[in-house]
Image (cartoon, helix red, strand yellow):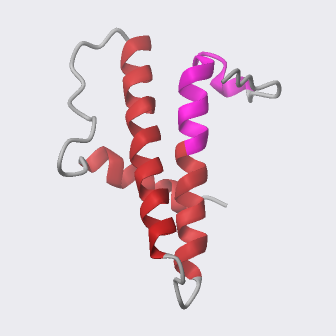
Amino acid sequence: MNWKIENMPEKYAALSQKTYKAAYLFISFCKLEKILLSHSEISRPWFLKWIMKQEICYYNQLITSFAEEMNWKNREHTLTLEPPELFISLKRAAMNTE
């Protein structure tokens, strides 16, 4: 997929397109989860599970891409069985943005 951001904010200019895309999609799926959870009745629980899997996928892409840009060998913040504190705090911050 050829995904290019034409109007990337200047403060993110140091990031690669890959990292920015992963961050943007992670935040978008967190906001989508918040919208879905705000409804009193969740009629499609499978959709909520899919959204959560996408959050994990793009979080891992974000951390991996950022680690490559920073030349970090250690990828301790990627998800394994339990979400790390960084994932939880980023998700909380993404859900609270407007």
Quarter-wise, where is residue 63 in the image?
A: top left
Point out residue 89 in the picture as x, y percentages from the top left corner. 37, 53
The residue segment tinted magenta is 10-25
Across the whole image, how many numbered discs are drawn on residues? 0
Residue occupying the point 25% across, 50% down: 83
Quarter-wise, where is residue 18 in the image?
A: top right
Point out residue 31 in the picture as x, y percentages from the top left corner. 59, 60
Point out residue 27 in the picture as x, y percentages from the top left corner. 56, 49
As drawn, 63 above or below 89? above
Quarter-wise, where is residue 1 in the image?
A: top right
Residue occupying the point 26% across, 35% down: 77
Q: Report the quarter where the C terminus lies.
A: bottom right
57 relative position to 13: left or right:
left
| Camera-side residue of 92 and 43 | 43
| Camera-side residue of 14 and 6 | 6
Task: Tell which residue pokes out farthest to the right in this image.
Answer: 6
Task: Tell which residue pokes out farthest to the top in this image.
Answer: 71
Residue occupying the point 67% across, 26% down: 11
As drawn, 62 above or below 38? above
Task: Tell which residue pokes out farthest to the left in this image.
Answer: 81
Secondary structure character of the magenta stretch overall: helix
7 relative position to 30: left or right:
right
| Camera-side residue of 86 and 3 | 3
Decide whether residue 93 is among the magenta residues.
no
Residue occupying the point 24% across, 47% down: 84
As drawn, 96 above or below 91? below
As drawn, 27 above or below 62? below
Point out residue 6 in the picture as x, y percentages from the top left corner. 82, 24
